[in-house]
């Protein structure tokens, strides 16, 4: 390993761009390098079969469990916290205010990192909106509560995230003009919410378009003009940004393990 890893890596972007595959591959790379690492499929159902197939080290979290732990610490009673979490009010609260659940889950992961200074967590954000909500929720709820115990906990979270040595975010995109524009907008919003850590938000491009042309042996000279222009534009995108290879096979464990050896640049 060429450098010391960050404490928290987040993979985000639009659906279907390869976030989960990359996050798992990166986790396996860190694990093979001797790092104490765990993968978290933030706020989504885990792909249990795939995780078992590649022996992926994981840390599972649920809003209810994380909230119960948090309330239990504040009240010094796990029994009362368990009772509170069973009330209709709290069950409804997380549905009405999704950002609250995101913040509690996020805070739980940061707690785990602070408790164990050797731990690295790779967080697989299921969609770009979830990533934004995670970061925005800390500022939003701080503005709502203004002071008190919750604000102190939020300050602790923000202090952790503001350290450039702690956090690195990868925004994953396809090599299309629309996908790239959306990814750049997301990167800008993340940078705005994480002032001071802009250098640690990277763009990763899935070069599936290049593989498609290579594998199909398509003669680009016979393409209509609008397709030639599209191909040229996507080629420029692939050449301009850091890409990861698209592996053309259906065996997901093999794809993850093949990619894991190529992950060093994502440190």
Image (spheres, helix red, strand yellow):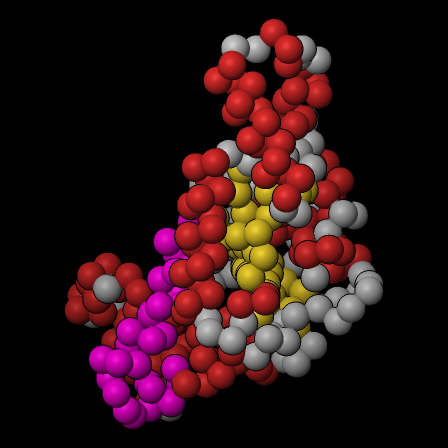
| Percent position of residue 154, x then y | 39, 82
Q: Residue at x 69, y 77 (%)?
A: 118
Q: Is 24 situated left or right of 33 in this image?
A: left
Closer-to-camera residue (76/267): 267
Residue at image position (79%, 57%) is 32
135 relative to 147 in the view: left or right: right
The single residue placed furthest to the top in the displayed view is 222
Q: Evaluate whether residue 242 shows in this view.
A: yes
Q: Position of residue 110 (x, y in %)?
A: 51, 75
What residue sits 61% from the left and 51% below the top?
23
In magenta stretch: residue 130: yes
Q: Residue at x 82, y 64 (%)?
A: 2
Residue 102 appears in the rendering? no
Position of the C terminus by quadrant: bottom right
Residue 15, above or below 144: above
Answer left or right for 4 relative to 227: right
Looking at the rendering, the stretch of residues picked out in magenta corresponds to 127-154
Vertical order, 49 against 184 (above or below): above
């Amino acid at each position: 390993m060429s450098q010391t890893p960050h404490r928290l890596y987040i993979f985000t972007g639009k659906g279907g761009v390869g976030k989960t595959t990359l996050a798992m591959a990166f986790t396996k790379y860190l694990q093979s390098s001797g790092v104490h690492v765990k993968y978290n499929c933030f706020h989504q159902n885990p792909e249990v079969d795939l995780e078992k197939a590649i022996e992926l080290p994981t840390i599972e979290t649920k809003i209810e469990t994380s909230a119960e732990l948090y309330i239990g610490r504040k009240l010094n009673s796990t029994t009362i916290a368990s009772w509170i979490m069973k009330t209709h009010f709290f069950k409804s609260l997380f549905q009405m205010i999704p950002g609250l659940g995101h913040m509690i889950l996020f805070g739980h992961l940061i707690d785990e990192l602070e408790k164990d200074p050797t731990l690295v967590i790779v967080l697989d954000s299921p969609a770009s909106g979830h990533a934004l909500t995670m970061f925005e929720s800390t500022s939003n709820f701080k503005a709502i509560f203004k002071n008190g115990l919750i604000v102190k906990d939020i300050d602790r979270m923000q202090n952790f995230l503001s350290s450039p040595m702690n956090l690195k975010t990868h925004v994953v995109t396809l090599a299309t003009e629309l996908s790239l524009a959306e990814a750049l907008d997301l990167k800008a919003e993340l940078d705005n919410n994480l002032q001071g850590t802009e250098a640690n938000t990277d763009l990763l491009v899935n070069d599936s378009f290049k593989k498609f042309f290579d594998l199909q042996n398509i003669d680009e000279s016979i393409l209509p003009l609008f397709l030639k222009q599209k191909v040229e534009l996507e080629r420029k995108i692939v050449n301009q940004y850091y890409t990861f290879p698209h592996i053309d096979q259906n065996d997901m464990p093999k794809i993850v393990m093949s990619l894991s050896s190529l992950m060093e640049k994502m440190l």
